[in-house]
Image (tube, helix red, strand yellow):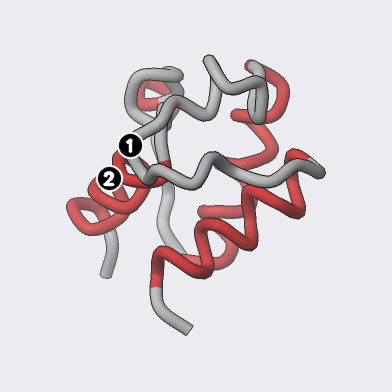
Amino acid sequence: MDKRTQILDIIRRVAGKEPPEAADESLFDSGVLDSFGLQDLVTELEHIFDVKIPDRDLTPRKFESVERIEAYLEGHGK
């Protein structure tokens, strides 16, 4: 399973909603995630991708879209 598919699956599981079709569409503006959902999303991303996401990075801007999440993980993964 590729990284984007894994991210989409995590969002579905955490949010209980379908992510937007466009990878660059905001998960927050579309109502898929809120601040509580962001915390749950980050916990799952850390677990699935074996990364540690520092508190300073827990901002909606960094995790605003599937595209940004994927880019973040590319820059911080193993």
Closer to the camera, 53 or 23? 23
Provide the secondary structure element on which disc 2 rests: helix
Q: Is residue 38 above or below residue 10?
A: above
Label 2 is placed on what type of residue? Tyr
Identity of the residue furthest to the right in this view: 16
Residue 27 relative to residue 61: left or right: right
Discs 1, 2 touching: Cβ within 8 Å: no
Q: Is residue 74 above or below residue 27?
A: below
Identity of the residue furthest to the front in this view: 21
Residue lying at 63% horizontally and 56% vertically, measured from the top left: 10
Provide the secondary structure element on which disc 1 rests: loop
Closer to the camera, 52 or 15? 15
Label 1 is placed on what type of residue? Asp
Q: Residue at label 2?
A: 72
Residue lying at 74% horizontally and 39% vertically, measured from the top left: 15
Q: Residue at label 1?
A: 24
Identity of the residue furthest to the bottom in this view: 1
Tag 2: Cα neighbours inside 10 Å, few (<14), some, or many (≥20)?
A: some
Quadrant that contains the C terminus: bottom left
Tag 1: Cα neighbours inside 10 Å, few (<14), some, or many (≥20)?
A: few
Q: Closer to the observer: label 1 or label 2? A: 1
Residue lying at 41% horizontally and 64% vertically, measured from the top left: 4
Percent from the top left, x then y, of residue 74? 23, 58
Whole-Å distance between the Cαs marked 1 and 2?
13 Å
Percent from the top left, x then y, of residue 3? 40, 69
Percent from the top left, x then y, of residue 35? 64, 16
Closer to the camera, 73 or 33? 33
Q: Earlier in the sequence, mark 1 or mark 2?
A: 1
Q: Is residue 28 above or below residue 23?
A: above
